[in-house]
Amino acid sequence: MTRKINIFDTTLRDGEQSPGASMNTEEKLVIAQQLLRLGVDVIEAGFPISSPGDFRSVQQIGQLAGDKATVCALTRAVDKDIDEAARALEGCKRPRIHTGLGVSPQHLHEKLRITEDECVERAVHAVKYAKQYVNDVEFYAEDAGRADQKFLERVIEAVVEAGATVVNIPDTTGYQLPEDFGARIKGLCDHVRGIENVTIAVHTHNDLGMATALALAGVKNGATQIECTINGLGERAGNTALEEVVMAIKMHGDELDAHTDVNTREIMRASRLVTSITGIGVQPNKAIVGANAFAHSSGIHQDGVLKARDTYEIIDPSEVGAKGSEIILTARSGHAALRHRLSELGYTFDEGTFDDIYKRFLDVADQKKEVYDEDLESIVQERQRTQSSSVYTLDALQVSCGHPLIATATVTITDDSGATTTTCEYGTGPVDASYKAIDKIVSMHGDLKEFSVNSISRGIDALGEVVVRIASETGEVFTGRGSDTDIVYSSAKAYVNAINRMVSNARAHDEAQA
């Protein structure tokens, strides 16, 4: 039997640190539910002391997970951080505190300004302090990829002796070559007393495009936990992508002496869910979950695949949940057909919710020859966004534009008090006029930082999805999404969605300060 490799998912913590990828507690709970369907071993739910929202997320995900997964809270090697993490994890059946500090010369001398002896002292104290609250304590040696090997071994031996159950060896900057990182893990296995009694974790970043290779090199040399994110989200160039390491281990289990317990058929659904919630898409040629991952355009490739799939595909698309449906949905499809297809995509709804989705489906179907899975995902996610961010509702939009006409927009919006306002503005184009009209009504204004339009599915009649990012006065970035066959209307919906997030965040902050 091969070694079990634990999958530690940090989409909700490190993944959320991608600029513009911030999520509220409700959205984190939706993703956490999907992580449980995937069967990950550990969910790093947040950094409790960083914000009331992160505290609530850790608390609620700890309750949601039950005994299905370990729920982990991040801290610095600081007592008050650990106290807050322990408080957030109260009631969690399988709690873990993840504490640590930097161990590289850059971190010791430039950031922390402490000696090696002080570093070891802080590390040991943090682990012992955390052990007062939970049995499962993970220690991270930040920037271990650039640390002196002998010193790294000294720190790890000290925290193992202090009671750490997991030691996390991150290549925080994605600096090392895979073979060197593998040798670093082997060195710990060979020289650290007691290392055989704890789990060795690897947490690698993609700054040089080698995160997956680094993680697998760690596994090959003794690591039994990989820390990763859905779609490779994370700081700078991102983290190791869960879908890549899981499928690589599945394909090369014997060579790596490794396996995971991840339900790979839930991978595609997880990828799409994270994309929908964060607004950060994956590149079309992204391994495993990209739109073109199982697409073939070359005649030679098509001929080969039609004769035998494995001539050009090493993975059966169905293994990652990418198998398409045979049902073609059009305006003539009834309730039963739509419900069946939504069920195949993993969605079930009560009658009231389903009726709303069906009405929206008919609106889209009336404008398109065929409704694709991507369209259905968009319809469902749009309704969920509307339900969770309802400070302002866009009731109507009418625009007039053309050359040499002046673009004008009339907007009607209802706020959460029930007040409805209609106003008109002009601008340099229909989107500019629409956004100016919206700004006249809403209570907070955002500085537009990014605006992008993409076709959700195929064809000239495809739904157009608009993603906007706006910055508040404090510099926080909020993402909004909207989809429709009318791009201007999509743009207005995306902008209102982003403003709703910004206003909701400001209200939550005010409540926390009260």
Image (tube, rainbow, N blue to C red):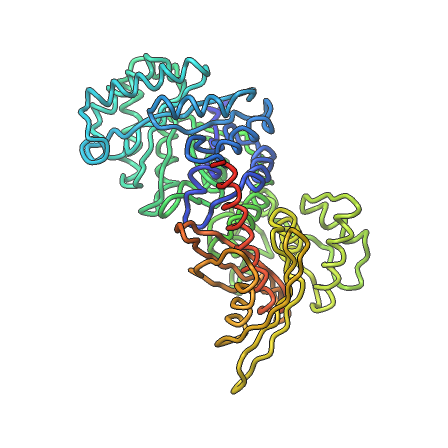
* Residue 15 sits in quarter: top left
Residue 36 lies in quadrant = top right
- x, y percentage for residue 404? 52, 87
**143 left or right, relative to 283:** left
Q: Residue at x 56, y 30 (%)?
A: 61
Total labels: the figure holds 0
Front residue of this view, candidates 145 and 224: 145
Drawn side of residue 423 relative to residue 14, left or right:
right
Left-right relation of 150 to 349? left
Rendered position, 109 above or below 494: above
Residue 179 in percent (x, y) is at: 29, 36
**Percent x, y for residue 149?**
22, 27
Q: Could you tell me if residue 89 is visible in this image?
A: yes
In the image, 306 versus 402, the foreground residue is 402
Res 349 quadrant in image: top right
| Vertical comparison of 409 with 238: above or below | below
Along the viewing direction, whichever of 191 and 170 lies nearer the viewer = 170
Q: Position of residue 19 (x, y in %)?
A: 41, 49
Residue 485, visible in the rendered structure: no
Residue at image location 56% in from the left, 52% down from the top: 500
Kindly identify the residue that appears in the image at 25 percent across and 29 percent down. 103
Q: Between residue 165 and residue 495, name the one nearer to us.
A: 495
Specify whether 439 is left or right of 228.
right
Image: 402 above or below 270: below
